[in-house]
Image: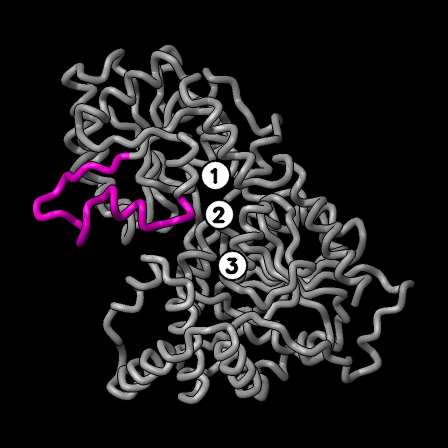
């Protein structure tokens, strides 16, 4: 059993096949919100979006979470929202071949190093699956143009549109009559069935492009959405570059709810209270080391050890404290030996609850509001952040906190086929950090110590670069994205 995907592109405006779907002006505003992962819960359930949307009408949340987690997530809007299940569907060989062909074609069309690197991964699974994947990659390479990808998309949508899962969501949407179907993430394959069902019924669909690197690194968008909500004009330009058939009128700049929590002063503790909670000394500087994904940030456990060595030896001045926060997807076991060597290292893993989803822990894991508040305080009270070219650079830049990116080799043989610096430069979404001077890059151990010392002595260094970086990446004021999203969704519903 495999799960299916298709891809975005222009499609004829479909007439509703059932008169019941005609939305009269007197009908309430109703959103079918697709939440295929925990990040969507953080962005759209914990923030202000859900509270504001339920003031206007009803929100149907389609999710993959364990049922036991849902009561704590209603946030006082029980009468204006309801929970529904997202379901996977079986992907048969023809559909699988078309999707793999489309994904391969998109990766060649984009042509960025992360996408081209993904094409070198070996085929996996049964012999039949491997044969289909290799054939799809060959055809996909020959199909790397917007016109040919459009043909493949239409064929894939036609094949998958006849699935029983799409029929299931057609029945659901006929019953709940959503004004718009909106996905919190453009990539997961779980959204394909409801999006195809909405397309068939003439219900407008929209998706939020949930991360700044997704368009240039993650292959093709999973489903044929009508509208795309992006962070900034910079991301809008990127969308049109990689998907030239998407109308500019169908891309909407709304900022991102990911950072709206940083505008809520009620979430902040005093420095003494924050340090009490994490076990730190409020009178000493605090460095936050943000770990990344295990597959990309392979050397985090080694780099944090170097930082601790530099502090112990006195090469980093002032005996600053270090708090290590792994990525939510990281179990953290790779840091065990570092924590034993340096018991003074503060360890604060994200408070995300493992789920009980039948589709795997990745889709069932749920963040907590406690973790949202901890991160808001961590970015506010830390004096400096260290990471390996992660999104946390943007989190801390929003707080006007300096960031050091570690790009020097710490393993023999090296962990990457190229140098760490060249590896980072392969991710074009990170180019503005370099070009605007929003962070400093440590190419050696000594340079690492120098950058940390300079920033701890004068945190205003590179302030203008951080400001310009945030202005480029986030196109609306922090804290305003929820209302911008609702305004766009209402406009989409009215136009339909």
Indicate the position of residue 29 as horizontal and vertical percent values.
80, 59
Mark with earlier residue (3, 2): 3
Horizontal relation, residue 312 to residue 170: left or right: left
Residue placed most toward the observer, 186 or 444: 444
Tell me: residue 326, above or below residue 364: above
SS assignment at label 2: strand
Q: Residue at x 22, y 22 (%)?
A: 449
- Magenta span: chief secondary structure: loop
Q: Is residue 46 magenta?
A: no
Residue placed most toward the observer, 140 or 225: 140
Between disc 3 and disc 1, the foreground one is 3
Indicate the position of residue 420 as horizontal and vertical percent values.
22, 44
Q: Which residue is mark 3?
A: 241
Q: Residue furthest left?
A: 412
Q: Which residue is mark 2?
A: 367
Query: Which residues fall within the magenta stretch?
Result: 406-430
């Amino acid at each position: 059993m495999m799960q299916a995907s298709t891809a975005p592109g222009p499609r004829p405006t479909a007439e509703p096949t059932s008169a019941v779907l005609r939305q009269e002006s007197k009908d309430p505003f109703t959103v079918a919100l697709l939440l295929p992962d925990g990040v969507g819960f953080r962005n759209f359930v914990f923030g202000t979006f859900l509270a504001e949307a339920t003031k206007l009408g009803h929100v149907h949340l389609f999710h993959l979470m364990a049922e036991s987690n849902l009561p704590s997530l209603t946030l006082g809007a029980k009468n204006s929202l309801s929970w529904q299940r997202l379901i996977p569907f079986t992907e048969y060989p023809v559909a699988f071949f078309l999707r793999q062909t489309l994904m391969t074609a998109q990766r060649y069309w984009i042509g960025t190093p992360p996408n081209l690197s993904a094409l070198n991964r070996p085929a996996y699974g049964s012999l039949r699956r491997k044969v289909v994947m290799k054939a799809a990659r060959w055809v996909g390479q020959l199909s790397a143009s917007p016109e040919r990808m459009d043909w493949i998309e239409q064929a894939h949508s036609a094949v998958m549109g006849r699935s029983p899962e799409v029929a299931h969501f057609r029945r659901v949407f006929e019953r709940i009559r959503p004004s718009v179907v909106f996905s919190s993430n453009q990539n997961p394959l779980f959204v394909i069935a409801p999006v195809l069902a909405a397309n068939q019924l003439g219900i407008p669909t929209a998706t939020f492009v949930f991360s700044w690197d997704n368009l240039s690194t993650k292959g093709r968008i999973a489903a044929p959405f009508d509208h795309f909500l992006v962070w900034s004009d910079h991301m809008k330009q990127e969308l049109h570059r990689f998907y030239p058939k998407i109308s500019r009128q169908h891309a909407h700049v709304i900022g991102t709810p990911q950072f709206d929590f940083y505008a809520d002063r009620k979430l902040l503790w005093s420095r003494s209270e924050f340090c009490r909670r994490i076990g730190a000394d409020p009178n000493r500087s605090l460095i936050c080391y943000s770990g990344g994904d295990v597959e990309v940030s392979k050397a985090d456990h080694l780099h944090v050890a170097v930082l601790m060595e530099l502090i112990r030896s006195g090469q980093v001045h002032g005996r600053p404290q270090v708090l290590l926060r792994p990525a939510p997807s990281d179990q953290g076991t790779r840091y065990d030996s570092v924590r034993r060597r340096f018991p003074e290292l503060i360890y604060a893993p994200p408070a995300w609850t493992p789920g009980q989803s039948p589709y795997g822990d990745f889709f069932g894991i749920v963040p907590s509001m406690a973790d949202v508040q901890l991160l808001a305080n961590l970015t506010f009270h830390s004096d400096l952040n260290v990471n390996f070219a992660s999104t946390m650079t943007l989190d801390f830049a929003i707080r006007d906190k300096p960031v050091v990116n570690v790009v020097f080799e710490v393993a023999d043989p090296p962990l990457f086929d190229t140098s760490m610096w060249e590896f980072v430069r392969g991710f074009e979404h990170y180019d503005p950090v370099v070009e605007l001077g929003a962070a400093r890059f440590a190419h050696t151990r000594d340079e690492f110590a120098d950058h940390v010392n300079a920033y701890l002595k004068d945190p205003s260094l590179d302030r203008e670069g951080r400001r310009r970086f945030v202005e480029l990446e986030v196109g609306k004021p922090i804290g305003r994205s929820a209302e911008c999203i609702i305004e766009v969704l209402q406009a989409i519903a009215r136009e339909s």
